[in-house]
């Protein structure tokens, strides 16, 4: 092979088959895409061993992508049940699935997931380490943490979340700041605990060069995790969060020197008026690397409705430069999401991504809305259904409440503005009380 990674190929002037596929899907010039991959502003997470993958690009000038979190746990270890969610997520055209499995047959689930998924697959290897080695956290060695990453690479994982930015320095900053929710990142809290229990440096920071060698071998993209992301509005945009971001910027350049693709993960719970500033900070401090955000969740008071709070934040984040949104379901903070929760979360995140794409002026985004507007003006219900982001729900709602007049709905009836304006514009009378002509 003439190149090691997509970034290495891009720097050498080589257009890969993955670049060709992404350029066609995004309707952009493949040379522009190649150049931005070489600069680190776009990534194509595509493990060489993920044969079922249909590649996607994430980054500057591309559609905002969404990710779905799935996986087995001690309380919900059913592999087949989670794979049913996987199938539904793929059917809903999500671009990425993160396997957050932390207990049980994690290797079996991960391998089956990679085998069936045409979407990108991400993992958080530190979650898998405790179960994989059947050891208490404190007793896992630095080399064993790296070996789990190696295992995920061999299994075909396209991107790995690595919390390498929380080193001893950022941990000290965290200790000096009185946070309400401390460390809410699961991976971040595990690594912080390991560092404290062993009085050692974060192994992913200390052995970052070895980590890069693993990622380079499989062309796994590193998603630099936000171990110190805020877990509540009060903790947003504080010292520990920004200190970690500075370290992530330094690690980004180290990865790029080795031709390893990088994404940056971001907050978290953030007040709505701070989102734009957070997007700007990430892009500046991390040199334009693609930004991957959870939500952001813009208020802490809505358990059961956090797919809405995150869609609000996600729309603003995407319009302000975020490239990749991690979905949030109504079950966030409460329990493992079921199929219905997953669907609600996917739709909410898709809406947020599309809203962001309209604001970014991406080709085709506004045109979709224009088609829907024309269909509404023409009272073309079939066209409206086909254009809807959730066609099944739109059809079901219409069917559940059948109007007396087909050219209206049960909300407005013959007072429908579209119906009446269409008649007036054609020189016809409006017959609200009389029978139809």
Image (cartoon, grey):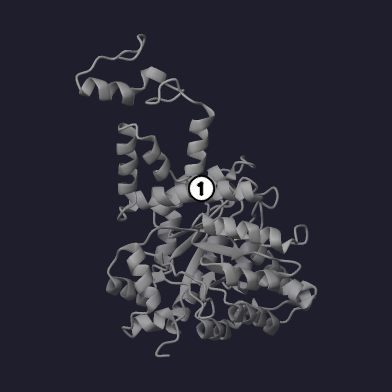
- Foreground of the two, 336 or 165: 336
In the image, residue 363 above or below residue 271: below
Report whether residue 157 is seen.
yes
In the image, residue 382 above or below residue 14: above
Location of mark 1 (residue):
347
The location of residue 368, given as percent across then percent down, is: 34, 47
Residue at figure coordinates x 58%, y 73% from the top left: 164
Report whether residue 276 is seen.
no
Residue at figure coordinates x 76%, y 68% from the top left: 104
Within 10 Å of the Cα at label 1, are there few (<14), some (14-19), or many (20+) other Cα atoms? some
In the image, residue 429 above or below residue 111: above
Q: Which quadrant does the N terminus fall into? A: bottom left
Residue at figure coordinates x 32%, y 24% from the top left: 419
Q: How many marks?
A: 1
Q: Quadrant of residue 138?
A: bottom right
- Foreground of the two, 270 or 302: 302
Residue situated furthest left in the rendering: 427
Q: Quadrant of residue 279?
A: bottom left
User: Left of 53 or right of it: where is 431?
Assistant: left
Secondary structure under the numbered disc 1 in the rendered image: helix
In the image, residue 392 above or below residue 34: above
User: Left of 90 or right of it: where is 28?
Assistant: left
User: Left of 159 or right of it: where is 134?
Assistant: right
Residue situated furthest top in the rendering: 434
The location of residue 296, given as percent across then percent down, is: 52, 51
């Amino acid at each position: 092979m003439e190149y090691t990674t997509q970034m290495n190929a891009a720097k050498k002037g080589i257009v890969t088959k993955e670049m060709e596929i992404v350029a066609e899907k995004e309707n952009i010039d493949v040379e522009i895409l190649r150049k931005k991959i070489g600069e680190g502003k776009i990534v194509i997470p595509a493990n060489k061993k993920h044969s079922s993958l249909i590649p996607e690009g994430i980054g500057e000038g591309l559609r905002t992508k969404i990710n779905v979190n799935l996986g087995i746990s001690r309380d919900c270890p059913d592999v087949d049940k989670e794979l049913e969610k996987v199938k539904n997520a793929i059917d809903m055209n999500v671009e990425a699935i993160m396997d957050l499995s932390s207990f049980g047959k994690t290797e079996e689930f991960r391998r089956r997931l990679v085998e069936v998924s045409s979407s990108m697959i991400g993992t958080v290897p530190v979650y898998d380490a405790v179960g994989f080695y059947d050891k208490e956290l404190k007793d896992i060695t630095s080399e064993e943490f790296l070996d789990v990453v190696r295992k995920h690479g061999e299994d075909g994982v396209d991107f790995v979340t690595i919390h390498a930015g929380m080193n001893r320095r950022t941990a000290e900053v965290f200790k000096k700041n009185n946070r309400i929710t401390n460390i809410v990142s699961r991976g971040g809290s595990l690594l912080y605990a390991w560092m404290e229990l062993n009085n050692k440096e974060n192994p992913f920071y200390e052995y970052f060069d070895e980590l890069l060698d693993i990622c380079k071998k499989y062309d796994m993209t590193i998603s630099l995790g936000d171990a110190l992301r805020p877990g509540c509005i009060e903790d947003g945009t504080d010292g520990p969060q920004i200190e970690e971001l500075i370290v992530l910027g330094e690690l980004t350049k180290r990865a790029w020197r080795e031709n390893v693709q990088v994404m940056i993960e971001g907050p978290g719970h953030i007040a709505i008026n701070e989102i734009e500033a957070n997007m700007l900070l990430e892009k500046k401090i991390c040199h334009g690397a693609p930004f991957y955000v959870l939500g952001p969740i813009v208020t802490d008071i809505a358990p059961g409705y956090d797919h809405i709070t995150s869609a609000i934040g996600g729309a603003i984040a995407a319009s302000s430069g975020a490239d990749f949104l991690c979905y949030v379901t109504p079950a966030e903070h409460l329990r493992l999401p079921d199929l219905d929760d997953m669907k609600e979360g996917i739709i909410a995140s898709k809406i947020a991504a599309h809203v962001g794409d309209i604001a970014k002026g991406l080709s085709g985004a506004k045109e979709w809305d224009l088609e829907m507007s024309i269909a509404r003006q023409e009272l073309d219900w079939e066209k409206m259904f086909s254009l809807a982001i959730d066609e099944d729900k739109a059809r079901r709602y219409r069917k559940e409440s059948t109007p007396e007049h087909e050219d209206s709905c049960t909300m407005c009836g013959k007072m429908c503005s579209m119906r009446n304006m269409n008649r007036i514009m054609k020189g016809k009378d409006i017959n609200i009380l009389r029978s139809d002509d």
